[in-house]
Amino acid sequence: MNVEGFKTLYWRQFDSIREGAEYFHVTKVTIRRWLNGETIINPMAEKLLIIRAIGYLPNDVRWQGFRIDEHRAVLITPEGREFSPRELEAFALWRDEYKELIKLHGHIERPPIIPARENPLPFRGGRRMQAAPWIPSKIRRAGK
């Protein structure tokens, strides 16, 4: 990332140099040098800034133990339960239904643990037709 890109992203995420220095665990002078281009930006600081910008889990006690599996696109709880993004969208409706069912029937003692639904990629591929096998032109002419 170049200095201009870092500077732009930095000011979108932080309101002051002090706030950024606390986040990266460096001094305010180091932040000023990174923003002015006097020193090379630490690659880990770039990664942390990108992580903060795109909304990964915050460094907070309430999120301790939660993980994200990027390859499968699931949120994993400290107990090992997994939620895909589509399941999280439907969570509010499920919670309301659950509360109504609890009122009617009571709690289930040992509910089964169900893994997260498969979260397919937006483009799965395989939509193109297979290419015809390549035949060198001298063999094609000889076969006529």
Image: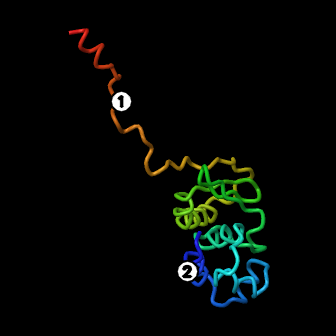
Alpha carbon of mark 2 to alpha carbon of mark 1: how far?
45 Å
Q: Relative to residue 21, is residue 74 depicted above or below?
A: above
Pinpoint residue 101: horizontal percent, then vertical percent: 59, 61
Q: Which residue is located at x 72 percent, y 71 percent?
A: 42
Picture disc at residue 8: 2
Mark 2 or mark 1, earlier in chain: 2
**Quadrant of the image occupied by residue 45:** bottom right
Please provide percent x and percent y for residue 3: 59, 76
**Residue drawn 70% across and 50% down?**
111
Residue at 34%, 29% (x, y): give it: 131
Q: For mark 1, what is the residue?
A: 130
Q: Residues within 10 Å of mark 1 (few under 14, many from 20)?
A: few
Q: At label 1, which amino acid type do we have?
A: Gln
Image quarter where the C terminus lies is: top left
Q: Secondary structure at mark 1?
A: loop
Label 2 element class: helix
Pick the residue in front: 66 or 59.
59
